[in-house]
Amino acid sequence: MTSPTSTTGTGAVAGAGEPPEPLPAHDQRRVRSATGLLAGFNDTGLLEAADVHVARRVSALAGEDDEQVQLALALAVRGVRSGSVCVDLAAAPALLEHAGWPDPAGWVEAVAASPLVDQGVLHLEDGTVYLDRYHRLESQVCDDLVERVGARPPVVDAAALDAARARIRGDRLSEQQERAAVGAVGRWTTVLTGGPGTGKTTTIARLLVLLADQAAARGERFSVALTAPTGKAATRLQEAVLDELAGLDPADRERVGRPEAMTLHRLLGWRPDNATRFRHHRGNRLKHDLVVVDESSMVELTMMGRLLEAVRPQARLVLVGDPRQLTSVGAGAVLADVVRGFGDHFGEGTDDSPVASLTENFRSTEDIKQLAEALRAGDADEVLATLRRPSDEVELVELPAEGAVAGAAAGPSTGEVLSGALRQHSLDLALRVRRHAVAGEHELAVAALDDHRLLCAHRDGPYGVRSWNRQVERWLADDVGEPVLGQWYVGRPLLVTTNDYALEVYNGETGAVVRAPDGRLRAWISGSERLRDFSPARLEDVETMHAMTVHKSQGSQAAHVTVLLPEADSRLLTRELFYTAITRAQQQVRVVASEAAVRAAVAREAQRASGLRDRLARRLAAADRARHVPATHEG
């Protein structure tokens, strides 16, 4: 095995980025009882309390007292916590300048001889250490994909395909989109990539028509599952697909039916007794003929493993997404690794490749397109030039290069610039939502939320969601002349943060608190089919959404987006975060940041250590060789 790969290339280091800062003496992340290497790296801030406690406890249970091995285990735990799947011991010193790093060769030997490996806690592969669970998951995902790609392709009725292909052609279907849809008919597995506005949903809608026609030609019914990681993304997927289908031939619409989109958890069958296992698995596969997964960049390694276990080998699987966006909250960068692993083996844009890339943007404004292209290219000068160019679509509100921020009450050097930049758009939206909510106009109140989003990298701190949610509430109270009292107030914008299967309310769905005709407050939440209302007391995991994190914004879009970038030294500030934020905008994007922060965001690519890309390319090559080895016969 070669060095583990990442979202951006080879040789990634688990959780690499800005060097950590030493922990203060009484910091809760410090473990005072730690000794040896664990204590030294905990003091530096590289390891946190959770990493140290797990390493010590598991090592004690396994009878492992070698502090080098304990350090490797702690780094593997830290890696998963940071989104990585593994850690390359030879590359680990890149995390931090420290005199205490073990000699790489001796370190690998110590881990190889450890009872932690014998007992299935750690897995060592060519100097790379995995927590065994994640090695098994990565291997399973790789094996399932290789098996799907190498299987005998589905039988296609060429005459029916040609007839349906002629019907789906039109002004709204590009040559790229048609080629992608037709290609997916002839494969069990397709990866459809492209940025916002490139027509991924248009392509999926045409694919549904083509496959429904194939089923009809065989005298069979066609069953499709549309799914996404969050409720909001699933809602948008269903709305977009139905909108596309509405413009097609009535007979085609009837054959396709009215597909319902749902979260991945709901599709796989959530189990209250096990958060990582589902009702559908290898022994109880999904019945669908086609499974479409939108926003696949958000799907972590564990969930991708469960999905691949549940999809029938003779069902088509289409993974849809943008590999340049932020990766999943959990460990792995599966979509990016799969795209690159397939590219390494098949080449990019070849007829044999399961990857179909859409590159023409039909929706975003020209200046937003240029900004996104400059970001993808990593050209900070062009990003800044595009932001500073006079435009109704793209704007940079430049913060001073120096000066600390202490919320909206900070000094004029930065605080007043921030307040001036954020107040008008945020307050205007808050007032509009409140006006509709007071009047009991729940549909208008919820719909207004898609007009503007204030996106932050952080949850906490002066550039964070919590701070600006409170500030918008203060502005709102000042403007309407009455205090915003309590958690539940009329006009409060809502963001659902977890799946509630009893209420059928799902992570990522949005809503607003509205006054009912009887004067009581009701929380209206946007679902995949309709708005639903609840007593606020029944909703537990919701947040105020005057501002939201960029991570939470994935799967959604808004007409106008304001992006607040933190200071340049923030570890969260990456090209993927910046790209994800600006591509949420449909009509206008405003970036509030210093020049240094913009340059830092463009320069810093997210690093997630993973072996999936290399493993996939190697397994595909081995499978090809096996298919071409002549059979031998004894006799």
Image: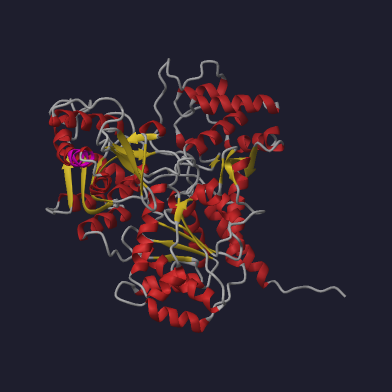
The answer to whether residue 39 is above or below residue 440 is: above
Q: Residue 442: percent from the left, percent from the top?
A: 27, 44
Total marks shown come to 0
Say whether residue 150 is left or right of residue 453: right
Which image quadrant is residue 38 in? Answer: top right
Task: Give the residue at the far right of this rendering.
Answer: 635
The stretch of residues the image draws in magenta is 429-437
Q: Residue at x 46, y 52 (%)?
A: 262
Task: Give the residue at the far front of this rendering.
Answer: 518
Dominant secondary structure, magenta:
helix
Q: Residue 17: percent from the left, percent from the top?
A: 40, 38
Q: Residue at x 27, y 53 (%)?
A: 379
Q: Residue 148: percent from the left, percent from the top?
A: 59, 63
Inspect this view and state whether residue 264 appears: yes
Q: Residue at x 43, y 15 (%)?
A: 26
Which image quadrant is residue 104 in? Answer: top right
Task: Give the residue at the far bottom of this rendering.
Answer: 159
Q: Quadrant of the C terminus?
A: bottom right
